[in-house]
Image (cartoon, rainbow, N blue to C red):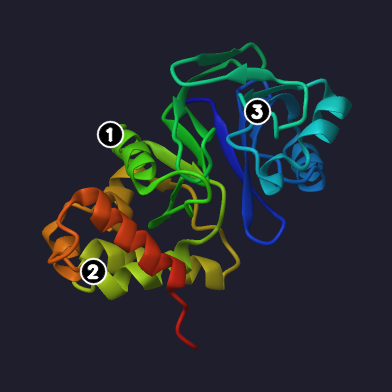
């Protein structure tokens, strides 16, 4: 991250659009669900847009891409998916996105589960993971299977602990509340929950997080821990994929307690 600036831009209801700018002021934007907040951030930060990265096809991650590209000439990089109806350089697992402006290089990692064509971009100590890995959570399984999502999370969890996790939504407070119902004695989780609540009370973002912190707090990365195994119904769900599937179902039905 030397000489790079990472900027979180809130958008829509709870999306986070990411900007990463090099020392010369050239910038890449990730998952621009709408264009207006990106244009505002470019002006505010006095940077110029050179490239656009898309992780998956959902409208709240691609809605502003065409307008931004048309206005700035930025090149869009996106997974191979006809539902992303923009002119783009199509990339897949194992590819590398090498940019001249900004001067950045990212490894492309296939992470199916939330959608089948979902990808992540990893480079410069930063992981742009869209809606696959959230802080203290993971994405819903709209298209993929539990086995696919768990394998995707396993791949991301194997990255270095100091990796900055830049996900697509501000869900940390609710995710912490759910995780604490399963892992109430986890001191790292308790600290993350307190931090997230304090940040949101100030109107600040809880993101990015680090992968090391996620390994300590995130139940979807702790599926093999003794605490999570004890909290789940292990008489019927001894296989780790089945444990993951049960955990995801519980999260799907979780409702925040009344304040």
Mark 2: few/some/many CA within 10 Å (<14, 14-19, 20+) = many
The mark nearer the N terminus, 3 or 2, is 3
Q: Where residue 28 is drawn, which disc sits there?
A: 3
Q: Earlier in the sequence, mark 1 or mark 2?
A: 1
Furthest residue in direction bottom, as rendered: 259
Which residue is at 47% across, 79% downward? Answer: 256
Image coordinates for residue 93, horizontal then vertical, percent = 46, 21
Q: Label 2 belongs to which residue?
A: 183
Between residues 12 and 140, which one lies in front from this camera angle?
140
Badge 1: few (under 14), some or many (20 or more) residues near its Cα, within 10 Å? few
Q: Foreground residue, 213 or 158?
A: 158
Left or right of 133 in this view: 169: right
Q: Secondary structure at mark 2?
A: loop
**Residue 251 location in percent, x, y?**
40, 66
Left or right: 139, with 88 as reference point? left
* Quarter assignment of residue 113: top left
The residue identified by callout 1 is 158
Instruction: Report the residue at 29% width, 38% height from top.
Output: 154
Q: CA distance from mark 1 to mark 3?
A: 25 Å
């Amino acid at each position: 991250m030397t000489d790079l600036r990472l900027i979180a831009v809130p958008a829509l209801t709870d999306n986070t659009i990411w900007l990463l700018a090099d020392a010369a002021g050239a910038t890449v934007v990730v998952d621009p669900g709408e264009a207006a907040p990106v244009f505002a951030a470019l002006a505010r930060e006095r940077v110029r847009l050179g490239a656009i990265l898309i992780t998956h096809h959902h409208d709240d991650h691609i809605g502003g891409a065409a307008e931004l590209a048309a206005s700035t000439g930025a090149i869009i990089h996106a997974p191979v998916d006809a539902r992303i109806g923009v002119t783009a350089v199509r990339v897949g697992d194992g590819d590398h996105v090498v940019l001249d402006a900004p001067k950045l290089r990212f490894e492309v990692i296939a992470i199916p589960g939330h959608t089948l064509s979902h990808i992540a971009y990893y480079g410069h100590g930063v992981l742009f993971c869209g809606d696959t890995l959230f802080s203290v959570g993971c994405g819903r399984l709209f298209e993929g299977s539990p086995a696919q999502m768990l394998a995707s999370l396993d791949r991301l969890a194997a990255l270095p602990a100091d990796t900055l996790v830049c996900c697509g939504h501000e869900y940390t407070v609710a995710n912490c509340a759910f995780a604490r119902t399963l892992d109430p004695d986890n001191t790292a989780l308790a600290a993350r929950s307190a931090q997230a609540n304090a940040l949101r009370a100030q109107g600040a973002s809880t993101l990015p997080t680090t992968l090391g912190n996620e390994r300590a707090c995130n139940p979807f990365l702790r599926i093999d821990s003794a605490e999570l195994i004890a909290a789940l119904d292990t008489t019927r769900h001894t296989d780790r994929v089945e444990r993951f599937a049960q955990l995801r179902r519980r999260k799907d039905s979780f409702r925040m307690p009344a304040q």
